[in-house]
Amino acid sequence: MGTRFFHYVRDPRVATWRKLSGLLAVLYFVSPVDAIPDFIPFVGWLDDLGVLSAAAFFMVREVQRWRPGTLSSEPELDGLPRDEQGQPRVPTLRRHS
């Protein structure tokens, strides 16, 4: 899962907000500004725990769904040249007579 996560983060086709969601959750965790202040015992830590667990669940699901080399909106690469609309451009064979 670690190397898959590394490749997921380095993939330029993945949206930046998806990559940063885990980092933003960690920043929320260490930030002194919270929805519920941390000086309230246990209750103050629950919002931090909720944000971290939601971000971890999101990232694990995203990395598991991610397929290197393909996106749902892109056709799989088959080695054929393509035109501007993404249709295969196969040269026609001419017969010389």
Image (cartoon, grey):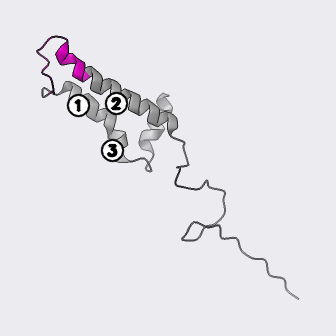
Where does the magenta region start and end? Answer: 34-48
Numbered mark located on residue 69 in the image: none
Of the pair 94 and 66, the residue shown nearer to us: 66
Classify the position of the C terminus by image quarter: bottom right
Q: Residue at image x 22%, y 25%? A: 29
Disc 1, SS:
helix
| Relative vertical location of residue 38 with respect to residue 89 in this rendering, above or below | above
Instruction: Say which quarter of the image contains residue 51.
Output: top left
Residue 47 in the image, given as x and y percentages of width and height = 23, 22
Cα distance in 3D space between marks 1 and 2: 12 Å
Any magenta on residue 39?
A: yes
Residue 56 to residue 92: above or below: above
* Amino acid under disc 2: Ala
Give the residue pinned by disc 1.
Answer: 27
As shown in the figure, which amino acid type bears the numbered disc 1? Leu
Q: Position of residue 62 (x, y in %)?
A: 45, 36
Crowding near pointer 2: few (<14 within 10 Å), some, many (20+)?
some
Among numbered discs 1 and 3, the one appearing first in the sequence? 3
Is 51 situated left or right of 11 in this image? left
- Residue 66 percent location from the top left of the image: 50, 40
Kindly identify the residue that appears in the image at 54 percent across and 71 percent down. 84
Residue drawn at x 19%, y 11% is 42
What's the residue type where badge 3 is placed? Answer: Trp
